[in-house]
Amino acid sequence: MELFRDTKIDFLSKKWYFLAFSLIFSVSGILSMAFWHHIPLGIDFRGGTVVDVKFVQSPNVDAIRGELDRAGLKDFTLQADTRSGSNELLIKLDIQETSEQALDKGKEIIVKALQGAGEPGKADLNNVGYSTLQDYLVKADPLHLGSDAPVQYAKIAHDIVDYRDKVRQGVLGSVADISAVAPPAVVSAIGQDYYTANFGVRNVDIVGPQVGAQLRRQAILATLYSLAGMLVYLWLRFELIYGVAAVVACFHDTLITVGAFSLLNTEISLTVIAAILTLVGYSMNDTIVVFDRIRENIKLLRKDSLTDIVNKSINQTLSRTVLTSGLTFLTVLALFVFGGEVLHGFSLALVIGIIIGTYSSIFVAAPMLVAYQEWRGNQSAAVASRKSKA
């Protein structure tokens, strides 16, 4: 499939406009990282506790903030999922509030603060674990199973927890909801000793400060190693200048993406680093396609100038670029819009990266290649002129 045929767009004549665009956004990102928001690291890198909470109804963020304040927590952040009907909230507790040994306690404080007084004498069915529920059923033995109680109640407890977490997305509206998977006698017994809070904890991520520092270092090294490996690959496949131009373009993409996160004050997590590494590979692949066509055309169009050859090569690969980048962009855009809060950073990095990566292959890597070859040609001409005069 080909969208464009025989296009003759003079891309390189527009290079200064796009290089100015790159300069503006790169400098803005650097200034933000240096003076404004800095690099907004997520819990993965700075350490702390993230509790993903699902509510029965849309959570009142101000009320929850007040409850956590009264529980003695400070410097926490609340991040609500804005999707209609999601009713999810991410509660992030910075490492400054808890030591590495007390990170589990951070989760307990958050859960207790949200539960409030609850119902005296009753446990919360929305936040009970499988083993605790099994032990309760074995002890209560509402079905009078006798010696078969441990095996039978293990299955019933497993069914109840699975129903709550997988079917009801982590939160039950009432104890009666479990009648879909539990016998009436079990429902009745649980109803006497359990109640359902208006929330359920879906997931808890706990990262210590030492682990966070190690993850920061490994994320930086992973990005640098990937760029170095690609430089060597392109050096061997083409010439060194091709590798340098492609790596500079990828570094440009990474800088603008991280700068955009800083400008938007959006946290950078491990999934964002994964997205950045993905876009580095994506941008490099796009650049290699253009460079490969340039190398072929240099052999075929020996009489043409390098600028004309590069323009022709970009036009010849334009249809492929629009199709692959366009379809990929639509996919990650859908992920950004509908993927929810957990995937927000990952999809945002890909949305920014695909746009910048596609543009840098044409307006950063290609002009850099032409500029170097022209400079080398001028240097060779100057050396030849000096020799002739001598």
Image: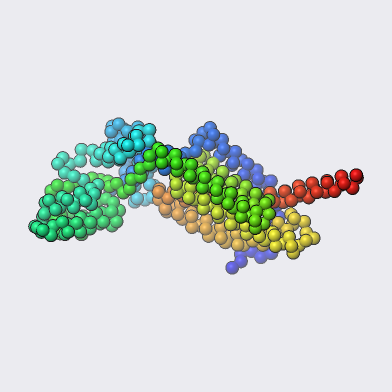
Q: Residue drawn at (37%, 50%), measured in percent from left and top?
A: 84
Q: Residue drawn at (14%, 41%), measured in percent from left and top?
A: 121
Q: Which part of the image, by quadrant, shows the N terminus?
A: bottom right
Q: Is residue 256 left or right of residue 235?
A: left
Q: Nearer the viewer, residue 255 or 152?
A: 152
Residue 42 in view of the camera: no
Instruction: Say if 191 sits above or below 155 in the image.
Output: above
Q: Residue drawn at (38%, 47%), measured in percent from left and top?
A: 81
Q: Residue drawn at (55%, 55%), measured in percent from left and top?
A: 282
Q: Is residue 21 left or right of residue 35?
A: right
Q: Which part of the image, by quadrant, shows the C terminus?
A: top right
Q: Quadrant of residue 185?
A: bottom left
* Coordinates of residue 164 in the picture (x, y in percent): 25, 54
How many marks the image carries: the answer is: 0
Q: Quadrant of residue 98?
A: top left
Q: Nearer the viewer, residue 98 or 39?
A: 98
Instruction: Say if 68 sits above or below 142 in the image.
Output: above
Which colour scheme appears in the figure? rainbow
Instruction: Say if 168 sits above or below 94 in the image.
Output: below
* Coordinates of residue 207 in the picture (x, y in percent): 38, 42
Residue 329 in view of the camera: yes
